[in-house]
Structure formats: C-alpha cells, structure tokens
Amino acid sequence: MRTKRTNQELVLKIVIIGVLTALAIGLSLIKLPITGVSVTLLLPVVIIGAALYGPCVGAWLTVIPNIIAYFTEGALFMVYSPIGGFATIVLKGILAGIAAGFIYKALSKKLPMVAITCASVSAPLINTGVFILGSYILIWDKMLEAAIDKGIDPEFAGIAILLGLGFNCVVELILNIVLAPAIFKILQIVTKKKLI
C-alpha cells in the first residue's frame, strides 16, 4: 500500500521526467552553428535524467529527439540505408543515455561530482562513436561522395569527415562537462533534497 509520501515522490518523479523529456525534445531542435555537423544541447539533459533516475530514463530521453533527428537530418541514411540508419541514429543516443546512467550509478555514492563529470564525458564519446561506426558500415562511401561534391579533395574527404565529427564530439564534450554538473546542482537546490 502506498503512503501519501510515496505518492508525492512518484508524482514528483513523473513530473521531472516529463519536464526533462520536453526539454530534451526542445533543446534537440536548437542547432548550434559551431560546426558543419549539428551540435545540440540534448546530452546534458540526458545526463541529468540518467543521474537522477537511472539508465532507462537516460535512454528514454534520447529516443524522441533522435527519431526527429533521423527525419530532419538523416537524408543519406534515408536514401541508402533507411532501417540501418534509423537504428544507428536512435541506438547512439540510447547507448549514450544508458552508459551515463550506469557510470553515474557506479561512482555516485563515493564521488558524486566525479560521477556526473564521468557521465558527462561518456555520453558524447559513445554517441559519436556509435554514429561513426554505423556511418562507416552503412553509408561511408556516400558520405565521401557528398564531401567530394562539396569541394573537398578526394584524398582528404575521409579525414575531413572524421575531423568534422570529432570536432562536434569535442564541442559536445565541453558543453556537457560545463553544463551537466551546473544544471544538476541547480536541480538539487530547487528540489531541496540531496540528489547527488
């Protein structure tokens, strides 16, 4: 039997997950014009959700934004490998959210700020790594053709693509390391309870 306190805690959890889901969707639609590859503010929200409520919530927070990303930015995947591309784009976020949740959980009891920082580092590395792997397996030759069509020297097209994706990863890594711990601390203060 649930008590009034457990009902209130459940409602608070549902509300926070709902707010984080809305933030994840909204922030994923804002593209920062830093690189030729889209940089979003999605991952700090994923890291916070994963730290607060575990790997499943971290994974959940990536699903809708990555489905949207597939349909708005996944043109090469849609044309040449629609199912594999969909799986790659959605799976990269899910794995990043799960990893952030498990990393946070493993370290948080003794080293809470190290835990949130390590989770912040893991998310963009896994997100970008899975994307590069999926792209390489499914559409690498088409990505090379697209780069060459944009005027990149054919000898350096592969390096240019990897540099662009790597730069994107570094930008997201820096954003995560700066934003996730700060937002997490603010959330801790606002909810007036020790979350970390």
Image (cartoon, rainbow, N blue to C red):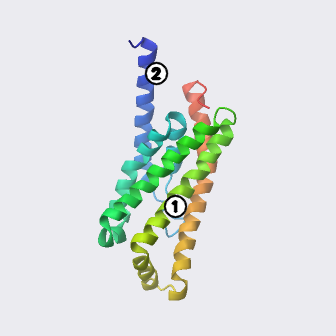
In the image, which disc is placed on residue 128? 1
Residue 107 lies, with reference to residue 29, above or below; the image says above
**In this picture, residue 182 sits left or right of residue 53:** right
Residue 29 lies, with reference to residue 35, above or below; the image says above
Q: Residue at x 61, y 52 (%)?
A: 121
What crowding class fits label 2: few (fewer than 14 Cα within 10 Å), some (14-19), or many (20 or more)? few
Residue 51 lies, with reference to residue 42, above or below; the image says above
User: For numbered disc 1, what is the local secondary structure?
Assistant: helix
Question: Disc count in the image?
Answer: 2
Q: How far apart are labels 2 and 1 at the CA level?
A: 35 Å
Q: Position of residue 65 (x, y in %)?
A: 39, 51
Q: Residue at x 58, y 51 (%)?
A: 122
User: For numbered disc 2, what is the local secondary structure?
Assistant: helix
- Please state which of residues 188 and 115 is positioned toward the viewer in this rendering: 115
**In this picture, residue 29 sits left or right of residue 187:** left
Residue 136 lies, with reference to residue 105, above or below; the image says below
- Which image quarter holds the C terminus? top right
- Please state which of residues 15 and 92 is positioned toward the viewer in this rendering: 92
Sooner in the amino-acid sequence: mark 2 or mark 1: 2
Q: Residue at x 57, y 57 (%)?
A: 125
In the image, which disc is placed on residue 100? none
Q: Position of residue 114 (x, y in %)?
A: 68, 42
What crowding class fits label 1: few (fewer than 14 Cα within 10 Å), some (14-19), or many (20 or more)? many
Residue linked to disc 2:
9
Tell me the amino acid under the disc marked 2: Glu
Residue 73 appears in the rendering: yes
Q: Position of residue 109 (x, y in %)?
A: 65, 32
- Which image quarter holds the N terminus? top left
- Please state which of residues 133 and 195 is positioned toward the viewer in this rendering: 133
